[in-house]
């Protein structure tokens, strides 16, 4: 028990480092060691077992903490030099990762061998455009909405593969991502990958040489590349071909976002990713084949089993097969966890050492974190270990009844099916707190979907995908590879038919708001207690400890108060407003691609985290793609009662559907749709809302050019009992002057017009509003130079606190009787790896 406590203390202390806003220095380390020595001396008088446990927790935790600090400090030092930021550098690099295929280019991780000027990190991510950008609606999409195939390489350019060495001119930047509460942290993801800069190719790169055996990781990635290249011709035109590729080599980049939505809502995401079950199955097949052959093979007149027991040979062969498959799968957290657990089990079997479930999990977790401290930042770490813990502890819930006759074949099959069902229900229920914490959504359809998906994918689709991959790389077996791919895809397509229907079912999943950390801790403690062996009093009731986190109602403003969330959507606009019982959205962010927009990427997850299941009012200020781009995804995800816009909302959606290659496929429309117009007002929860612009309501959709759309944008003012806010969208100085002439008056919070452009925020407008807080929604390094430095200085000279989403992330402003309080996502949850 002491050893397990030490291992878990190491893991916990390593995870604690990732919650720090900054890394401690050498003085803190010396002080910690001195304190640990002192505490170790103070417990000398305690019983030996107690003393040993305290020492294990103390010193293992100290080792985990400071080892992680040292490694993090080393990675932080490998940063892009300030003089190279957003500048072009000449870099010689080696392709280190499997290139991501896109319709317009390639993206891959690379090792930097040399650079001019110096100051380029050793590992970067490169984007190489091979075709002109096709715009936010893509190119070549068919009537079904399928994405265009990857762009072909220019003449004379070799296929980009791991191990190749290139000389490139790259425009380099430090990784920078959107920062919103309870959302995906792109900067943390890149830091965990060791990627310390991103680069975009400029000019024509020069191919230098090929080094496919530069290292074991390079060789493994090269093998993945070869298998993918061999499989792609056999998957062409297949709806779920990308899923077969993901099951074979772990390449998930080509899986459609709509498919991930279906997998998440039905709880089968773990099946379409290479997980522990897949690796264990392949290892078991390799071990079984070795066992069968080893008992029959002879060498110089003696059976091989006489020299080495067949069971030992099978265990070692299974471990070798698992290691090779893990390398082919990309060596992710689930793969590492599975391999290490199999290694411990194989070692224990060979050495005849007893290993219980807790020792196995503790050793695997320790080894994973020791190899990669940032594995703790991946949701797969927690879901993977959580699922294995549930399965291992659940295996002791039943035993073999004594004194009964052996059941028949059909009876045994029924018992196995019942056990499998109970295990799946246990895993589904046990992982609810983790899923709620990470994704803010829990699937109710998961037990039913997994009941048929597990056998189909595990016993049919995955083996067929792997056999197809194996046949594809062998010359002369193309017909076999195509046939196996067809069979695997047919089984997958058959399974997906009911799965898609389940995902569209309104009750397939429910939204869970972000709960406080202490409720999450209570839920996890309930999970652990419920999984403990028989004998613990009340262990069956421990499941109830998860209910407060799953049913947590987020705090809402009081009557007459309001909360405004200016989301970080880059160079776009999206504002969420909450009152005591209602929720409003002003603008829907940017559409950046046919399968990517801020409605699905940012706004929907934020609404889920806030416990908002419907929007009472949606205002789309104007028809620019950076304000209306997420409209379609938002309407598909959240019911909307009333909408206001300065253009024909339904007409805009029809035009967009045609551009996306889905003519006539409209999302659910709001129950009522009205134009925004000066003088329109409504009151809810003690807060009044009023449109101050546009003055008229011209006929037509008000498309026109950009300046016309900006000039006719909806301008909304809200007033609570204590404070007011103004959302002027993209109006310019002329419209601001008209508002001032009409007696705009003081406003406490202002969204900087037109992202803080120099053509807005005129001196008269700034002096008229006398705002306390001004928020500019702008993207980092945007080509417009927003917000303009003169505009920012003008607001600050007037006495306003100037917030920028590119600097501060999402900004939240609370209006209450106690005053006006503003916070930002980057300041509220600062981490040591963040760009300063």
Image: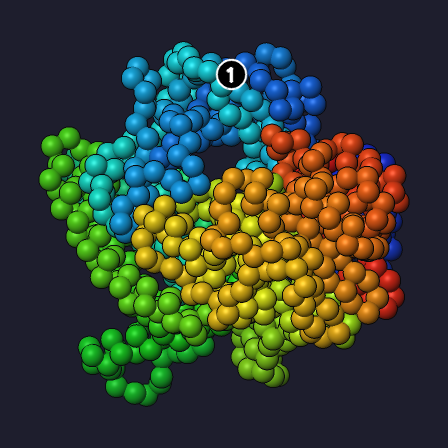
Q: Judge left or right: residue 335 versus residue 610.
A: left
Give x and y (percent) for residue 432.
52, 68
Task: Characterize the local packing of mark 1: few (<14), some (14-19) or many (20 or more) Cα atoms within 10 angstroms.
Answer: many
Nearer the observer, 716 or 320: 716
Report the residue marked by disc 1.
169
- Helix, strand or loop at disc 1? strand
Give x and y (percent) for residue 516.
69, 65
Give x and y (percent) for residue 648.
47, 56
Query: Residue extending furthest bottom?
Result: 403
- The structure residue drawn at horizontal position 21% and vertical position 36%, both measured from the top left corner, is 233
Quadrant position of residue 162 = top left
Nearer the observer, 754 or 201: 754
Nearer the observer, 477 or 91: 91
Give x and y (percent) for residue 14.
67, 47
* Quarter containing the C terminus: top right
Up-down: is 283 above or below 398? above
* Quarter containing the N terminus: bottom right
Q: Judge left or right: residue 316 versus residue 671.
A: left
Quadrant position of residue 149 = top left
Q: How many marks?
A: 1
Q: Judge left or right: residue 520 versus residue 293.
A: right
- The structure residue drawn at horizontal position 63% and vertical position 31%, both measured from the top left corner, is 784
Residue 556, visible in the rendered structure: no
- The structure residue drawn at horizontal position 72% and vertical position 59%, both measured from the top left corner, is 717
- The structure residue drawn at horizontal position 73% and vertical position 55%, both measured from the top left corner, is 726
Residue 530, visible in the rendered structure: yes
Q: How is the image coloured?
A: rainbow
Up-down: is 292 above or below 320? below
Up-down: is 650 above or below 175? below
């Amino acid at each position: 028990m002491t050893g397990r406590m030490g291992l878990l203390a190491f893991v916990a202390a390593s995870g604690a480092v990732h919650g720090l806003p900054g890394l401690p220095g050498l003085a803190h380390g010396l002080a910690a060691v001195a304190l640990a020595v002192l505490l170790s001396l103070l417990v000398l008088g305690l019983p030996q077992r107690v003393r040993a446990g305290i020492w294990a927790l103390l010193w293992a935790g100290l080792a985990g903490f400071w080892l992680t600090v040292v490694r993090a400090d080393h990675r932080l030092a490998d940063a892009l030099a300030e003089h190279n930021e957003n500048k072009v550098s000449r870099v010689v690099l080696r392709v280190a990762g499997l290139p991501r295929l896109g319709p317009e280019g390639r993206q891959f991780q690379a090792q930097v061998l040399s650079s001019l000027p110096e100051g380029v990190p050793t590992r970067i991510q490169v984007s190489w455009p091979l075709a002109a950008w096709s715009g936010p609606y893509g190119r070549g999409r068919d009537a079904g909405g399928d994405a265009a195939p990857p762009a072909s390489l220019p003449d004379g350019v070799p296929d980009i593969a791991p191990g190749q060495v290139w000389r490139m001119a790259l425009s380099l930047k430090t990784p920078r991502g959107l920062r919103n509460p309870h959302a995906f942290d792109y900067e943390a993801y890149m830091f965990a990958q060791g990627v310390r800069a991103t680069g975009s190719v400029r000019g024509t790169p020069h191919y230098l040489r090929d080094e496919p055996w530069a290292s074991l990781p390079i060789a493994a990635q090269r093998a993945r590349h070869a298998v993918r290249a061999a499989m792609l011709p056999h998957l062409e035109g297949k709806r779920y071909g990308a899923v077969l590729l993901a099951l074979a080599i772990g390449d998930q980049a080509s899986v459609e976002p709509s498919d991930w939505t279906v997998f998440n809502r039905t709880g089968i995401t773990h099946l379409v990713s290479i997980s522990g079950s897949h690796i264990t199955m392949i290892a078991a097949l390799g071990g079984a084949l070795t066992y069968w052959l080893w008992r029959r093979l002879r060498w110089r007149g003696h059976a091989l089993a006489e020299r080495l027991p067949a069971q030992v040979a099978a265990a070692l062969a299974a471990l070798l097969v698992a290691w090779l498959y893990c390398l082919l799968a990309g060596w992710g957290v689930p793969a590492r966890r599975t391999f290490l657990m199999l290694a411990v089990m194989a070692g224990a079997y060979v050495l005849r050492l007893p290993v219980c479930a807790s020792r196995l999990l503790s050793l695997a977790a320790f080894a994973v974190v020791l190899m990669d401290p940032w594995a703790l930042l991946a949701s797969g770490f927690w879901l993977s270990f959580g699922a294995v813990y549930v399965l291992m502890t659940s295996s002791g819930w039943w035993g073999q009844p004594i004194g009964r006759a052996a059941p028949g074949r059909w009876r045994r099959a029924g018992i196995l099916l019942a056990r499998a069902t109970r295990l799946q229900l246990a895993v589904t229920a046990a992982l609810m707190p983790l899923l709620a914490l990470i994704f803010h959504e829990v699937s109710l359809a998961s037990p039913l979907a997994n009941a048929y998906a597990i056998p189909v994918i595990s016993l049919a689709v995955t083996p067929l995908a792997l056999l197809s991959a194996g046949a594809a790389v062998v010359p002369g077996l193309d017909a076999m590879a195509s046939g196996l791919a067809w069979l695997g895809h047919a089984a997958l397509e058959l399974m997906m038919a009911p799965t898609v229907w389940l995902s569209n079912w309104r009750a397939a999943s429910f939204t869970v708001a972000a709960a406080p950390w202490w409720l999450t801790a209570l839920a996890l403690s309930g999970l652990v207690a419920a999984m403990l062996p028989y004998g613990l009093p009340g262990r069956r009731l421990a499941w109830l400890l998860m209910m407060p986190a799953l049913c947590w109602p987020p705090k809402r403003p009081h009557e007459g108060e309001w909360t405004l969330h200016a989301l970080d959507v880059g160079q776009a606009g999206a504002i969420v407003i909450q009152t005591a019982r209602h929720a409003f959205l002003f603008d829907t962010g940017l559409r950046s691609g046919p399968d990517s927009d801020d409605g699905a990427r940012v706004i929907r997850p934020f609404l889920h985290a806030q416990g908002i299941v419907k929007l009472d009012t949606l205002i789309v200020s104007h028809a620019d793609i950076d304000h209306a781009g997420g409209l379609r995804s938002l309407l598909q995800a959240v019911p909307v009662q009333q909408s206001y816009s300065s253009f024909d909302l339904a007409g805009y959606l029809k035009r967009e559907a045609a551009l996306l290659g889905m003519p006539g496929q409209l999302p659910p429309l709001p129950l009522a749709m009205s134009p925004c117009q000066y003088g329109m007002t409504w009151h809810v929860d003690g807060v009044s809302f009023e449109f101050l612009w546009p003055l008229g309501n011209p006929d037509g959709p008000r498309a026109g050019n950009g300046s016309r759309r900006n000039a006719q944008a909806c301008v909304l003012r809200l007033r609570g009992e204590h404070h007011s806010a103004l959302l002027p969208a993209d109006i310019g100085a002329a419209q601001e002057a008209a508002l001032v002439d009409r007696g705009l008056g003081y406003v406490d919070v202002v969204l900087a017009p037109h992202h803080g452009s120099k053509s807005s925020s005129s001196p008269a407008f700034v002096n008229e509003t006398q705002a306390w807080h001004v928020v500019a929604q702008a993207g980092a390094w945007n080509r417009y130079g927003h917000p303009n430095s003169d505009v920012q200085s003008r607001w600050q000279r007037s006495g306003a606190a100037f917030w920028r989403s590119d600097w501060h992330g999402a900004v939240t402003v609370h209006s209450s009787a106690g005053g006006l309080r503003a916070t930002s996502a980057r300041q509220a949850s600062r981490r040591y790896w963040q760009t300063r």
